Amino acid sequence: MSRVLTDAERRDWLKLARTENVGPVTFDQLLQRFGTATEALAALPGLAARGGRSSLKLASSAQVDRELADGAALGATLIASCEAAFPQALAALDPPPPLIWARGRVELLDQPSVAIVGARVASAAGQRFARGLAAELGQAGQVIVSGLARGIDAAAHEGSLPTGTVAVLGGGVDDIYPPEHRNLYARIAETGCVVSESEPGRTAVARDFPRRNRIISGLSRAVVVVEAELRSGSLITARLAAEQGREVLAVPGSPLDPRAKGTNDLIRQGAALCEGAEDVLRALESLRGFREPDREAFRGAPPEPDDALRAQVAALLSPTPVSRDEIVRATGAPAPAVFAALVELSLAGRCELLPGGMVAQE
Amino acid sequence: MSRVLTDAERRDWLKLARTENVGPVTFDQLLQRFGTATEALAALPGLAARGGRSSLKLASSAQVDRELADGAALGATLIASCEAAFPQALAALDPPPPLIWARGRVELLDQPSVAIVGARVASAAGQRFARGLAAELGQAGQVIVSGLARGIDAAAHEGSLPTGTVAVLGGGVDDIYPPEHRNLYARIAETGCVVSESEPGRTAVARDFPRRNRIISGLSRAVVVVEAELRSGSLITARLAAEQGREVLAVPGSPLDPRAKGTNDLIRQGAALCEGAEDVLRALESLRGFREPDREAFRGAPPEPDDALRAQVAALLSPTPVSRDEIVRATGAPAPAVFAALVELSLAGRCELLPGGMVAQE
């Protein structure tokens, strides 16, 4: 699978990834169906029209040029999921992010990594714990991945600056948020690595964070949650991590501390209890011999869906996400044909294909 | 099995229980072998001699008189494990405590109970949590059992004074320790119940606490540990509780708090995580339909051990506790004969029979 894209191919990958309604799931399905981004781009207007939309606007060549120039100006590297330099752990995700921008020591992305995430409004004790944990895991040879946020994230980066730290951003690789992390960001970009699925120059908005969180857990073999309230973003990262087959650990806390509600709940649900680096290393030990599945094995060109199937699939959608497998069962049609119909509907903006196999009406 | 002892029988039960080298295990084995305490007392000197000691001194009648008078003066009740008034949950222990003294509302001992135990040097937050948990569980109909110690124990009693609380003491039912709990003790004796396996007037010493802890967990269907350092008494209670088939719950805490080390470790080992009364009630729910096993089914008079077997058993003992089952396997002899030999050796002071099926050379 691994290769290096030509400049023209890379531009087409970028163009496809930046076209409206093309998320990682659709990108992946298109690549499976058409073999190359170039072929997929050519087919795109027709697919969208079949999905019910006649005017799908592809990303422009100027937009692609600008993004490549912006990235180059930052000294950042664009890596496509089919390339050898793409982090193996991310390539094995279903679907992988099509492309990532990386700034700094890109080689860190293929080293054994542990994510440390948690509350933005963290206690001093929680931050101290995160900093110490990151330092100890770093000394044990683990790269520490986090999200550059206030609180636990920042502490985790600080603790692992000397050994290797990776910040995954929701905005572009130059989107420093919060602003007081300017110094921390600069040190990470110099000695660690900054990664993003977004285009340089983009300021993160709320819907960028689930994608960011998926990369945080995707890069890591284990995710440690330090302080988290119920219904917080860190718990979403933990859930994604579990879905990705990552080891999930949580730091316990007093029932009287609302910042421990989320982590205690994770432990109750089966996350390993983390009191220090030893617990994380023990959990990693149990993963030894674990290999990311080879996604190539599942690939194959899907058959074309007909109008009747497409209409049937569209009728089955609702704003509440359901699994694609459920839709396959409800139609009784072959899964690849149903998936192809969903791609067409998603290109037309009639549904959203979510990582994790779910789909929702738009 | 249930009956009321005659005065003479009760005196013999007490005499047997108070004779040196007769612990609950030996008491139980003797009762199984000889049917009554009276018969066992008659056989005792001979058994001890066979074990290697010619001068076993039985408890005196004066000692028995004094204990009965002391208890009566306190308004306490002596209940034998064969009597209907003996708490069912304790009667089902293997072995049960032969006799308990109870002061106050004895009927509380047969109501659904939860033990709350923990650190003596507890944090204010831990004590607040224990008090609130006890109050909530009390309102849900649970009697709260604890050990009258400083810290978590006292808070648990305080929280459950209005609904029903049981204090189990290592010393006699009148042994108020620590002294500042005089008021708390008085309120428990009035509205709750104070229980002890020891004779009235006895001041607790270190070796009384394992027996006390066994009664705390034995009376309860679930044991909640709130704050405990590693290698603390509360963890022993938790272990006993697990051995007795009780539900064990632990309150999590920050890894930076040494008082959470013990409880976090319990959770790691499989104890249920407790953040409040709801967790305890859910654990009790899962015990519904649980019935204490009927110990009668396992009773039977054991055969006499011969000298060769007794010598073989004695040679297998060491100061490190081993299970009686291991000794049975090593000898290849029938278990009842090996147990009888162990009783003789224990009466001679050559070994100690520990609850939980372990035995150690003295």
Image (cartoon, coloured by chain):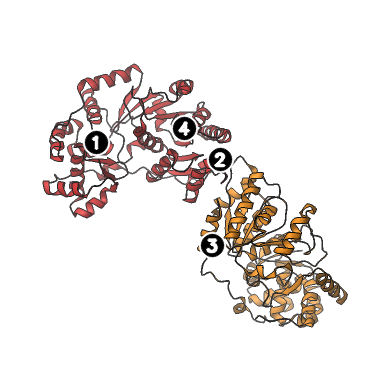
Chain colours: A red, B orange
Q: Secondary structure at mark 1?
A: helix
Give the amino acid at mark 4: Val
- Residue for point 38% across, 22% down: A174
**Residue at the spot of label 2:** A276
Residue placed most toward the observer, B130 or A66: B130
- Residue for point 77% across, 56% down: B183
Specify the quadrant that holds the C terminus of chain B: bottom right
**Residue at the spot of label 4:** A143
Q: Nearer the viewer, mark 3 or mark 4?
A: 3
**Label 2 vs 1, first from the N-terminus:** 1
Give the amino acid at mark 1: Phe
Whether labels 1 and 3 share one chain:
no
Residues at circles 2 and 3 in contact by the CB criterion of under 8 Å: no
**Residue at the spot of label 3:** B284
Q: Nearer the viewer, mark 4 or mark 2?
A: 2
The answer for which chain carries disc 4 is: A
- Residue for point 52% across, 40% down: A259
Specify the quadrant that holds the N terminus of chain B: bottom right
Whether labels 4 and 1 share one chain:
yes
Q: Position of residue B222 (x, y in %)?
A: 59, 61
Q: Secondary structure at mark 2?
A: loop
Give the amino acid at mark 2: Gly
Crowdedness of circle 2 by 10 Å Cα count: few (<14), some, many (20+)? some
Q: Position of residue A305 (x, y in %)?
A: 14, 46
